[in-house]
Image (cartoon, rainbow, N blue to C red):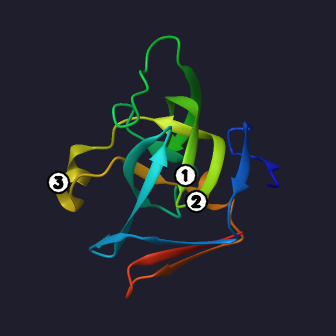
Amino acid sequence: MTCKLLATVLMLGSAVCAAADKQVIYVKVVEGMVFVPVKVNGSDVLLMLDTGATNTVVSPKAVHVPVNAASQMATVTEGHQQVNVAVARLDVKLGEARIDSAVVVLTDLSPAQAARYGKFDGLLGQNVLSQFKSVRIDYQNKVIELER
């Protein structure tokens, strides 16, 4: 299995390993928004695919990772302001494609987002999506295709 090291926006690395060159993943589509089933640190989560999000974001409760004073912190831009957030290196799996030690922002999303789209656990951002050669969204068949 070939692995290659890529730098993320937070200047932390993540190794990319996959069992196949192409993954097809069934997704949920609500009001045009795509929700992808993902495993993060072994926990099944549902993440909104967000091509405008620099980083992947997940609820710490959903992946059983406590956020406390000892957590690693980073500054990210949210809207027009910079905020400090907890980050962790977590394993992310989309189908059979693995991204080891991906940098994930640990925070809960606003209740307004859950009220509009139903329960989901975070955002699937560019730091994970950019690990693929292409990401194709097929709205009609409700799948995404990830190609290495």
In the image: residue 145, left or right of residue 130: left
- Residue 135 at what x, y percent from top left? 60, 73
The image position of residue 87, as x and y in percent, is 55, 30
Q: Is residue 138 above or below residue 92?
A: below
- SS class, disc 1: strand
In screen coordinates, is 11 left or right of 121?
A: right
Spatial CA distance of label 3 from label 1 is 27 Å
The answer to which of 31 and 5 lies nearer the viewer is 5
Quarter containing the C terminus: bottom right
Marks 3 and 2, how far apart at CA: 31 Å
Q: Name the residue under label 1.
A: 93
What is the count of numbered marks?
3
Q: Quadrant of the N terminus?
A: bottom right
Secondary structure type for disc 3? helix
Kind of residue sitting beneath label 1: Lys
The dot on residue 96 is 2
Q: Is the C-beta separation of discs 1 and 2 under 8 Å?
A: yes
Determine whether, in the image, residue 16 is placed left or right of residue 73: right
Q: Can residue 82 be seen in this view?
A: no
- For disc 3, the marked residue is 115
Q: Which of marks 1 and 2 is in front?
A: 2
For the residue pair 62 and 105, the one nearer the viewer reads as 62
Camera-nearest label, 3 or 1: 1
Q: Which amino acid does label 2 sit on?
A: Glu
Residue 144, horizontal then vertical, whole percent: 49, 74
The vertical placement of 36 against 42, above or below, is below
**Would you say residue 62 is visible in this rendering?**
yes
Q: Earlier in the sequence, mark 3 or mark 1?
A: 1
Query: From mark 1 to mark 2, how far is it between C-alphas?
Result: 7 Å
User: Which quadrant of the view contains residue 107?
Assistant: top left
Q: Which label was assigned to residue 67?
A: none
Q: Residue at x 60, y 61 (%)?
A: 129
